[in-house]
Image (cartoon, rainbow, N blue to C red):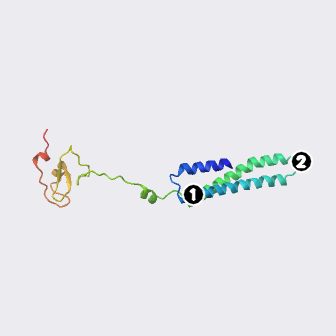
Amino acid sequence: MTRKICAFLAFVLTEYERMTQRVWILLGVGLMTSYLANVLRMVVIVLIGYYTDTGETDLQNMLAAHSYAGWIIFLAWIALFWGIVFQFFGSPTRAEIEAKTVIPRNRGVRCGICTESLTPLLPGYRCQCGKFYHAACATTVGECPRCHRKMRLPQTAAEPSA
């Protein structure tokens, strides 16, 4: 039983980052069912020893029951417990995952046409409405997509010198 508890505890402590109420409930239910599975295993061993009471085979039957019934009960416990855990505590839904996912914000200014970041290396243009554009993007469009004003680019901004 100690191995079951240690394995279960190790799983819970490594799988979950924070010990929330849900994890504590999972841990408590797991420990309780592990204890009950061990009690059931001992009851089966004693019953087999009691009902197979012959002088020659009672010890062999109890050893066989301890080995095989113990494994059968342990596997049944694992199947039942994890079936219940995944049914009630299943993995988070896509909405929960997306709610926890933080999308990093790009703090730089972006071009209103190509949506790439504006950098000091590329010449830029600011429309009268306040929107920023690459000078090359502004010359291809000719007017601001936001306010539809004609973009007046200085010649040096539109055509950088070599």
**Which image quadrant is residue 122 in?**
top left
> Quick one: which residue is furthest to the right in this view?
55
Q: Which residue is found at the position 81% from the left and 53% from the top?
A: 48
Whole-percent x and y of residue 16? 52, 52
Residue at x-position 10% and y-position 47%:
155
In the rendered structure, the answer to whether residue 45 lies left or right of residue 56 reads left
Quick one: SS at disc 2?
Answer: loop
Outermost residue to the left:
155
Label 1 CA crowd tier, 10 Å (few <14, some 14–19, many 20+): few
Q: Position of residue 35 (x, y in %)?
A: 68, 55
- CA distance separating discs 1 and 2: 48 Å
**In screen coordinates, is 100 left or right of 27?**
left
The total of numbered circles placed on residues is 2
Image quarter of the C terminus: top left
Q: Label 1 is placed on what type of residue? A: Trp
The quarter holding residue 141 reads bottom left
Provide the secondary structure element on which disc 1 rests: helix
Q: Which residue is mark 2?
A: 55
Label pair 1/2, CB-CB below 8 angstroms: no
Viewer-side residue, 25 vs 158 = 25
Q: Amino acid at mark 2?
A: Gly
Give x and y (percent) for residue 140. 17, 51
Q: Earlier in the sequence, mark 1 or mark 2?
A: 1
> What label does residue 24 carry, if any?
1
Q: Residue furthest top?
A: 162
The crowding category of the residue bearing disc 2, from other C-alpha atoms within 10 Å (few below 14, some 14 to 19, many at least 20), is few
Foreground pick, 61 / 131: 131
